[in-house]
Image: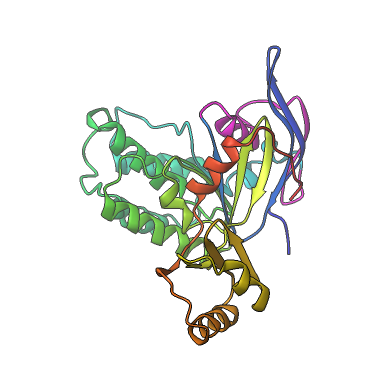
Amino acid sequence: MEKILEVKDLRKSYKDKLILDNINFSLKPKEIVGLVGANGAGKTTLMKLILGFIFKDSGEIKFYNESSFHNNRELMNKIGFLIDTRIYEHLNAEENIKIQMLYRNVKDRKKTFERAKYLLELVGLNNVDKKISDYSFGMKQRLSLTLSLLSDVKLLILDEPFVGLDPNGIVGVKNFIKEIVEKEGIALLISSHQMNEIDELCSRFLILKDKKIINHNLSKDKVYIFNTLNNLDFIKNNINGLKIIKNKIYVNDKKNLDLAIDFIRNNNISLSDIELEVDSMGKVFKEVENEKSSQSRTI
């Protein structure tokens, strides 16, 4: 499948401090990838490098296989972003939208403006006549999110898109993001400290640690059987495909789960509980942060 964005051997430092080292990853159409890391890990720096806001020390960034895309206005108009978005505070939301459409050379302005009005309603900004200078921080963030989605983008970079949204707004924005990514073939790189909000959105994650990238795919269907007795080895030796950690039996598919349950029942083994466990980015991130070292992986 075609790669929309490709990052190779990217390196960035400020003065004598190395921030990012040997960063390698790519994004494909219809892919939602989460970018996570501790404060100061380099998430915002990486996003700004991709957008051309700051210069890299070495390495290569390609958008649609073009490494000089930062100088190509037509290609840059295909990138939407929520990071250091320019908003004219003496104007209202509608005027900011019109300026953004002019800047991005939007052809179908009527259709784009209808989309913008829908987005404003989705994020709870119905009063388009109110000046931005009277907006709260959360309202400005919501307007910035709307501006990032105006044009026919193919790469979307969102930094903390859920800040300032109430629960209903978060659900609406997530559903809209999933819809346009699938419908319009967008590649999305999203960073958020609200990991529970991006768990269900992302197909995989890029974890920034020790200046490098760790690629991680979450398991969405891990099942475990919890046993209070000392029969774990007996069960494991008789049923294939099981993994035992402490006194939990992990089963990774429905067939093995059924076999394990039948075996336990037929051998009169008592269970305290049977649960479904879905892996979470918060759990994985905590485990990664607790590791002494990590390896960089090319995606």
57 is within the stretch colored magenta: yes
| Vertical relation: 22 (above or below) 229 | above
Q: Which residues are magenta?
A: 39-66
**Residue 172 left/right relative to 78:** left
**Residue 19 left/right relative to 165:** right
Would you say residue 5 is visible in this rendering?
no
Q: Position of residue 14 (x, y in %)?
A: 66, 17
Nearest the viewer among 180 and 225 is: 225
191 is within the stretch colored magenta: no
| Vertical relation: 250 (above or below) 28 | below
Q: Position of residue 22 (x, y in %)?
A: 76, 34
Q: Position of residue 128 (x, y in %)?
A: 24, 44
Nearest the viewer among 197 and 282 is: 282
Q: Position of residue 228 (x, y in %)?
A: 45, 64
Colouring: rainbow
Residue at the extreme top? 15
Nearest the viewer among 55 and 266 is: 266
The image quarter containing residue 245 is bottom right
Residue occupying the point 55% across, 66% down:
249
